[in-house]
Amino acid sequence: MNSTPELTERDFQIFRELVYRHTGIHLHEGKRQLVKTRLSKRLRQGGFPSFRHYYEHLVMDRTGEELSRFLDAITTNLTGFFREPAHFDFLKEELYPKIRREVEHRIRPASIVFWSAGCSTGEEPYSLAIHAMDHLGDLPGLQLAVHATDISQEAIRKAAKGIYPLSRVRSLPKSLLRRHFLKGTGPQKGLVRVKPHLRGMVRFQCGNLLECSLPPDEMDVIFCRNVMIYFDRESQHRALRNLVSALRPGGYLFVGHAESLSTNKLQMGLDYVRPSIYRKR
Ligand SMILES: C[S@@+](CC[C@H](N)C(=O)[O-])C[C@H]1O[C@@H](n2cnc3c(N)ncnc32)[C@H](O)[C@@H]1O
């Protein structure tokens, strides 16, 4: 017998509004089944007889804990190490040589600050730390920092642990794995953990892109990839305003390859560099 309660059209609408209000994510009509599947587990765990009962509990819960579980269930956290490699090639071929030149001419300090905005379970910010270490690590006194934020607390918890199944890193070069990952043994067999020197460089924090809680530093590079793709025009605009204000002049913003930002980038103070890459004026 199928015991999953029905998600009515009205139920879908009220969850949809709640998701939009808290995340900026616009769930279109076709996402009804997805919402039902993802929330069914919470209904079963909490013993709620219907989606409406669950909704009432969710909005009455003043601790914010249920909202956090709800957002964990609704957000899509798909990610991977060195995803969309053309972006990493751009850093290597364009940005790092420029930083090197500027450091040599004493125009800038030997430092680079990244923000992985919508970092999911951490693969993206760790990839940035690894990449910068491997290509700029020889600069004397290099200061390297990666800020990493996501609205999902569960994703941030996993990210901060830095533990992944071996299958997630199998395609990476062996020498890179040796330098930056520890292989699990005994009960940890089949897992890898990011080495402490990398974990120390990445600062994880739960944060909403639509709010103005920005990392403290001025960013050289922001990766906000495959996050705003789920936003409508209005949320994209709000998020972009926050991202641009966190960038230093000349800093770069990377979005996902499949994303087309509907907001007028020029008005936001961004110049187009190449598809999915923008530079702050
Ligand atoms: C598909 S993942 C992308 C991960 C990574 N950037 C990548 O491209 O591999 C999208 C992430 O954006 C996060 N997210 C969605 N809305 C957000 C918001 N308003 N503020 C911060 N993070 C958000 C989700 O929780 C999810 O982890």
Image (spheres, grey):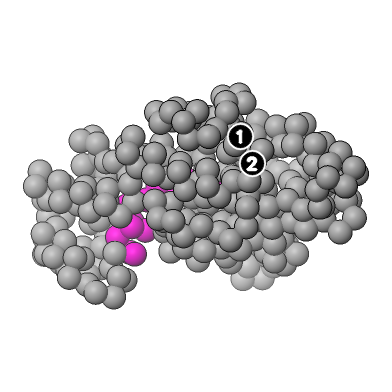
Q: Which residues are magenta?
A: 68-81
In this rendering, would 55 be left or right of 245?
left
User: Which label number is shown at residue 179?
Assistant: none
Residue 73 in magenta stretch: yes
Per the model, the C-alpha gap separating discs 1 and 2 is 6 Å
Q: Which quarter of the figure has residue 68?
A: bottom left
In the foreground, 163 or 86: 86
Q: Which quarter of the figure has residue 65?
A: bottom left
Residue 2 seen in the figure: no
Going 26% across and 63% down the picture, which residue do you hit?
42
In the foreground, 2 or 257: 257
> Residue tagged by mark 1?
281
Q: Amino acid at mark 2?
A: Pro
Going 58% across and 66% down the picture, which residue do you hit?
161
| Residue 254 image point, x, y percent | 57, 37
| Residue 27 image point, x, y percent | 27, 41
Q: The C terminus is located in which quarter? A: top right
Q: Amino acid at mark 1?
A: Arg
| Residue 209 image point, x, y percent | 43, 51
- Marks 1 and 2: CB-CB under 8 Å? yes
Residue 160 in magenta stretch: no
| Residue 154 image point, x, y percent | 44, 63
In terms of secondary structure, where does tag 1 sit? loop
Query: Could you tell which of marks 1 and 2 lies nearer the N-terminus?
Result: 2
In the foreground, 253 or 160: 253
- Other residues around mark 2 within 10 Å, as few (<14) / some (14–19) / many (≥20): some
Going 74% across and 46% down the picture, which residue do you hit?
131
> Residue tagged by mark 2?
249
